[in-house]
Image (tube, grey):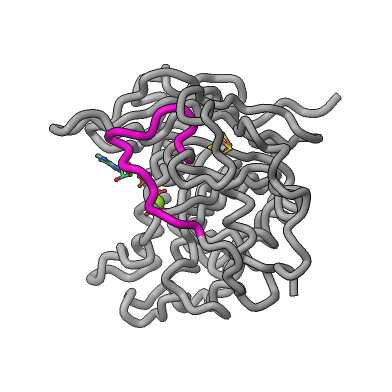
Amino acid sequence: MSSPPLLEVDRLVMHYVTEKGEVSAVEDVSFSLKKGEALGLVGESGCGKTSIAMSLLRLQADNAVFKSGEIRLNGENLLALPEDEMRRHRWKDIAMVFQGAMNAWNPVYRVGDQIREALDLHFRPRLSDAEVTERISRLFEMVGLNPAMANRYPHEFSGGMRQRAIIAMALSCDPSIIIADEPTTALDVIVQDQILQELKKIQEELGMAIIYISHDIAVIAEVTDTIGIMYAGKLVELGPTVEVFARPKHPYAYLLLSSTPSVTGPRRKLAPLEGEPPNLLNPPTGCRFHPRCPYATERCSIDEPPMEVVGDGHQVACWNWQEVPVTISQEARP
Ligand SMILES: Nc1ncnc2c1ncn2[C@@H]1O[C@H](COP(=O)(O)OP(=O)(O)OP(=O)(O)O)[C@@H](O)[C@H]1O
Ligand code: SF4
Ligand SMILES: [Mg+2]
């Protein structure tokens, strides 16, 4: 029998309450994560990726409201836990590399001391000073930093090194799940690639599960087993990364991938995606993608398509997925 999922997001709906109304940031999103699995969440800016990540840690903004759904860690609904119980899980079970965190180091403290503080706060039972020093050295080695760097200040680190140290901090409490929200976005392509490959190696060695979040599907294709494509607060396609890459079924995924030829090849814009993502204060009726979708039919603006199983572990939310070409045209693949 296959092992039960470590994490299950079950029909999660999360809105932000604002003066102008409710922002429908996460709308009926479901996915699960097994021990050791690497899942990618991809989509344009503002589609709800960080909102999902913050919900998983229950670090959502003050104006966020969970309307329905559950987030289950080993079967326990995190959304129903009192805050002090949630604190037991945060960092120890689920840790996060926050979007833009590499710029959040406090400039006046040594990097090692900042990790030490996090360990003191979250690691139970507490470690002795010697154990903490040993642990930080080990974490630094793991992420490819010289342990001596722990005594340095953030300004003495390059961007890539600061991000490696952030990853070390996220790993410090031995979490079973790490969420990496745009972990390499601000870095140059070579450093990006090195860090992602190293993170993948660490993840596999430790048997940790990971959720990679990125607006760039090419960046995380190589390091994920499963990929979820988001559009305007909805998860519109979910499946094995190789399968989604080879045979995307959702028109948005298809267009996204047609303009991302391959992970290794040059970028060639084939079918540019026209228009802007919708305002989530007032999302389109029916399928949220319908105003931009070349495959839209009358029904699309009226009825919302449910997730439908289209292959082994492959689901898509589209009324007309069968109209989407079976594979991305060969010209798209250099
Ligand atoms: N605290 C908030 N109050 C109101 N709206 C918010 C709040 N935080 C985020 N939003 C809105 O919710 C939607 C989802 O935002 P989110 O940050 O989750 O997107 P994202 O996919 O992470 O984007 P990016 O790729 O730019 O990081 C957006 O429309 C955003 O403007
Ligand atoms: S349901 Fe309709 S509008 Fe939505 S993606 Fe499918 S074809 Fe396009
Ligand atoms: Mg984000």
Which is nearer the eye, 244 or 269?
A: 269
User: In the picture, which quadrant includes the C terminus?
Assistant: bottom right
- Principal SS element in the magenta part? loop
* Residue 267 falls in image quadrant: bottom right
Q: Is residue 157 magenta?
A: no
Q: Which residue is at 52% across, 43% downward?
A: 230
Q: Which residue is at 41% across, 42% downward?
A: 48
Which is nearer the eye, 213 or 76?
A: 213
Indicate the position of residue 331 as horizontal and vertical percent values.
74, 70
Locate residue 326 relative to residue 168 in the image: left or right.
right
Locate residue 311 relative to residue 199 in the image: left or right.
right
- The quarter of the picture showing ligand 2: top right
Q: Which residue is at 55% across, 23% downward?
A: 10
Q: Which residue is at 69% across, 34% downward?
A: 315
Indicate the position of residue 326 as horizontal and vertical percent values.
77, 48
Q: Is residue 284 magenta?
A: yes
Indicate the position of residue 323 as horizontal and vertical percent values.
70, 41
User: In the picture, which quadrant includes the N terminus?
Assistant: top right
Read off the magenta span. Answer: 273-289
In the displayed orientation, state which residue is furthest to the left. 19
Indicate the position of residue 182 as horizontal and vertical percent values.
47, 59
Residue 32 shows in this picture: no
In the displayed orientation, state which residue is furthest to the right. 1
